[in-house]
Amino acid sequence: MALFTRAPKAEPILGQNRMVAALLGVATWIIGLTFFFPLFWLVLNGFKSELDANSSPKLFFEPTFDRFTEVTEETTGLLSFSEAFGNSFWTVVPSTLLVMLLAVPAAYALAIRPMRKWRDVLFFFISTKFLPIVGAVMPLWIIARDFDLLNTRTILIVLYTAMNLPLAVWMLRSFFAEVPKELIEAAQIDGTSLMGQIRQVILPIVAPGLAATALLCVIFAWNEFFLAVQLNPVEGSTMPVWVASQESGRGNFLAKLSAASVLATLPVVLAGWVAQKRMIRGLAMGAIK
Amino acid sequence: MSNAVVERERELRADEVRRAGEVKRLERRDGWKRRLPILPALLFTIVVTQIPFLFTLFYSLTDWRIDKPEPREFVGFENYGDLPGDKFFRDAAWVSVQMTVMAVLFSLIVGTLLAILLDRKFFGQGFVRTLLITPFLVMPVVAGFMWKSQMFSATFGVLNWIIELFGFEAVEFATKYPLASVVVVLVWQWSPFMMLIVLAGLQGQDSSVLEAARVDGATSFGIFRQITFPQLRPFLELGTLLGAIYLIQVYDHIDVVVGGQPAAKNLPFYIAQRSIGGGNVFGLASAYSIVVVIASIILANIGLRVLSNLLEDDS
């Protein structure tokens, strides 16, 4: 079943009347803008002076970049913006690479040349996501402490890899299952080696799926807070912990906190905008392929 | 029957047996060849996700407190015996149930409505979809803070500003309705996710079937009920499953929006608070964890049954 290819366009569910259609279009716009409003307001607050932000809501004000420079330059807190950003980057990127390194062969074994009982194995991966992380966090904390891994990026890299692996296996399997078996067989008959088959036949087809999966892993790892704050509350910590630490400051720092939030959120929001269609296709394909 | 024939027969049979053995060996070797690529991922997952639970199980049978020096004593099932009497645990369990059910259900409803609205041609369709997706991408800590201080807040909050515009008294939402406040933020973040999954389902519909129904004079609502909805079912189930997996573990939103007020404290939050969050009663908290894990396994089994139906359907 091919998603997103709908050559004669299916009639929409709601009304065919032109008037109704126009009204529904307007309604959708209003709902879309309403959903986005809190974020719009966040960006706006980031450009306000504290005086403007900490008053009853104001739409018009004199915009300033000062809050952004303040939060990026300040080094008085437990960790500075650039440290947190670096920590996040060097946690998220290695963990995502590790996830892909483990998940790609696994997806191959589940979809292209399926092993026996591949369903049971896939279920096992998914089932690990059902187990509440809080049930494991105490031993993890103790193991991390005993191995001197508390407040290091290493422990987060390992845990984020485990956190994202089931989802990556699930998504990649559905992308790999899309590779036509005939293509692979044809390559085999031509005497192409396994590596050759992977490079020439499989990779070109699954490449967009790989990118979408990696991006989803990046999003979840970048936004993760619970493990980061429990295992890495101090210097090794990441952007979410940095944002949360901005909040604990006394006094009225709404504008500053907004600026910090915008900076912390932006990379992942941009990535998500770029990959939106493919990401969800990978998730949804799992259900039907 | 001559000796030669018997001999020949025996040879043939022996040959067959040999060949069968050969095939089996090849198959076995092939089996390992097929299994090999998945082993690293499997081993990694087992070591990182399963072994800590064995430790938790062991801790749950001790009276261990991190603030008291060792040795920890083995107390058997005493911790579990304390459990039914712990009002805070019961409250947290009830909050967990309410929060997960409400958040999943409302996001599913809102997400489906959004998907239906989006699944039609109108000016700026792609742009509006992008607007609607964005909440899902936002860091939960930021989402929580944002709603708390610029939407819910009685002094600076936009919601209260609107309420006051209509002449009503401002409400400190996060303090007065902590559970509802958290659910609102969760629904805001997860509706877009549900919307995308349902949208994939709507767009995968076979247009010729819809066309035929229309030619036969079916109403829009009739088509939705009899054709679209049955086709959407696997997508709705998938959304429920994935949503529940993540929403049952919510921690960040609670921490930021309500800071652990009892009325909005779920099990993950409560357990973290009692153990590494400063409570220090590791033995007892481990017992809580084990109970949560067992409950999760029961729920997961139900969920996996749904999932297995999803996978069976296509094969």
Image (cartoon, rainbow, N blue to C red):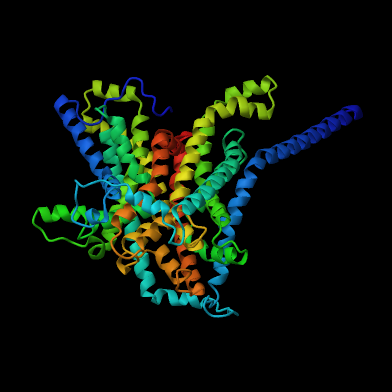
In this view, B209 is above or below B300:
above
Query: Residue B101 falls in which quadrant of the image?
Result: bottom left
Q: Residue furthest left?
A: B167
The N terminus of chain B appears in which quarter of the rendering? top right
Nearest the camera: B306 or A242? Answer: A242
Q: Give the percent coordinates (x, y) of residue B179.
A: 29, 61
Whether residue A261 can be seen here: no
Apparent side of residue B134 relative to residue A22 in the rendered image (left or right): right
Query: Residue A240 falls in which quadrant of the image?
Result: bottom left
Apparent side of residue A32 relative to residue A260 in the rendered image (left or right): left
The residue under the point 58% across, 26% down is A181
Q: Give the percent coordinates (x, y) of residue A18.
A: 16, 24
Nearest the camera: A282 or B11? Answer: A282
Nearest the camera: A223 or B81? Answer: A223
Q: How many marks?
A: 0
In this view, B246 is above or below B279:
above
Q: Give the percent coordinates (x, y) of residue B45.
A: 58, 51
Q: Give the percent coordinates (x, y) of residue B270.
A: 40, 67
In this view, B12 is above or below A41:
above
Nearest the camera: B296 or A210? Answer: A210
The residue under the point 54% across, 76% down is B64
Q: Residue furthest right?
A: B3
Query: Residue A248 falls in which quadrant of the image?
Result: bottom left
The residue under the point 30% across, 67% down is B263
Whether residue B247 can be seen here: yes
